Amino acid sequence: MGHNHSQGNQDCFFDDEHKDVHDNKTTHHHHHHDHGDLWGWRLGVSIFLNVIITVSQVIGGIMSGSVALMTDALHNFSDVISLVISFIANKLTLKGPTISKTYGYKRAEILAAFINSATLIGIAIFLIFEAITRFTNPLSIKADIVIWFALASIVINFLSVVILHKNSKENMNVRSAYLHLLTDVMTSVAVMVGGVMMKYYGAFWVDSTLSLLIAFYLIYSSYHLLVESAKVLMQFTPDAIDIEVVSNKISDIDGVENLHHLHVWQLDDKRYMLEAHLELSTNMKISDFQEILHTIEVILKEFGIFHFNIQPELNRCKNKEDLIARG
């Protein structure tokens, strides 16, 4: 404790929370593994169903001449890609940490969510241009084919949505796949309604209009997930954490002068990480410092932070305003 740069690592207080990192035989690890296997199975079924939808809608789009049905098919194809990415990411996440990968593949699912949402926005922009082109060159469309293929897509996609619904609330990766499928149901309903209007009213302009609406909705629904996953990848401070409140609470502990060089980031969907330098008021024994660390542990748990690393210092940073590192 006499050296100002000694490292205070609080992992030992958190063994119960993260035993899966240290011991692959614990109950916590098996619980996570079982959930991962279940997600993997559900994603696998959804992939199979969406391959069927994509192939059938491409055939239906060619047969009917409907750009809206082709748009929906392309949308479903993006789902196949996103689901495959999600499936692979899910499997990678189940792998434990190694010497060369101390966090394992915890961010694989975040990366998958980013790729999925970015891909969907890119496809939507392409479909907007395609629909505008069709407006200037309208074609007669076989509405019966559009109606039946859209109906089949609604049924199969709805089944996939039901399969992934529960896990979509717990995992950003599964939520991105779920979002893809949910928008598919809605777009297929719109395509079917459009088919009915074309069949009974000859309103073929509806086809291009639906394509535009679907594309704009894809951009709207994907933007939030794109930003959310990008923030995690960029290691921005999580929205749920007020970094100044955390600092003030820790700085109010007896024996603490201030907290500085503070960093808070998100490893994956659920894990917040913190590291900081802790300026102590006086020189103290390691046992006294351990008491301070325990108090910090209790405070950080209130914010959902279960892993932190504190570097104790003495007479190095009296500036309480220097909360974050400047260089």
Image (tube, grey):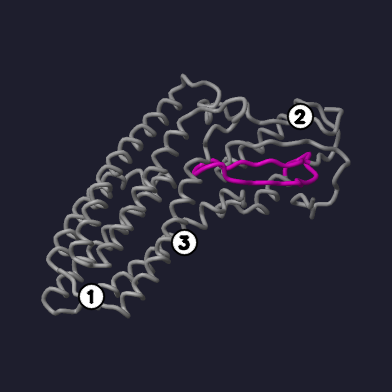
Considering the image in quadrants, where does the N terminus appear?
A: top right
Q: How far apart are marks 2 and 3 (CA)?
A: 48 Å
Mark 1 surroundings: few (<14), some (14-19) or many (≥20) residues within 10 A? some
151 to the left or right of 44:
left
Residue type at mark 2 is Asp
Q: Does the magenta stretch include residue 314?
A: no
Estimate the spatial distance between the alpha carbons at disc 3 and disc 1, rounded to whole Å: 32 Å
Residue 10 appears at what percent x and percent y? 66, 31
What residue is pinned by disc 2? 288
Would residue 146 appear left or right of 167 to someone viewing this image? left
Residue at the disc numbered 1 = 139
Q: Mark 2 or mark 3: which comes first in sequence? A: 3
Residue interval drawn in magenta = 253-278
Residue at 13% across, 79% down: 201
The crowd level at tag 3 (other Cα within 10 Å; few <14, some 14-19, many 20+) is some
Instruction: Find out whether residue 268 is within the magenta segment.
Output: yes
Does residue 264 sit above or below 198 in this rendering? above
The residue lying at 85 percent from left, 37 percent from top is: 282
Name the residue rendered at 38%, 70% in the picture.
128
Say if mark 2 contacts mark 1, CB within 8 Å: no
Of the numbered discs in the image, which one, if any, rests on residue 234? none
Q: Quadrant of residue 186?
A: bottom left
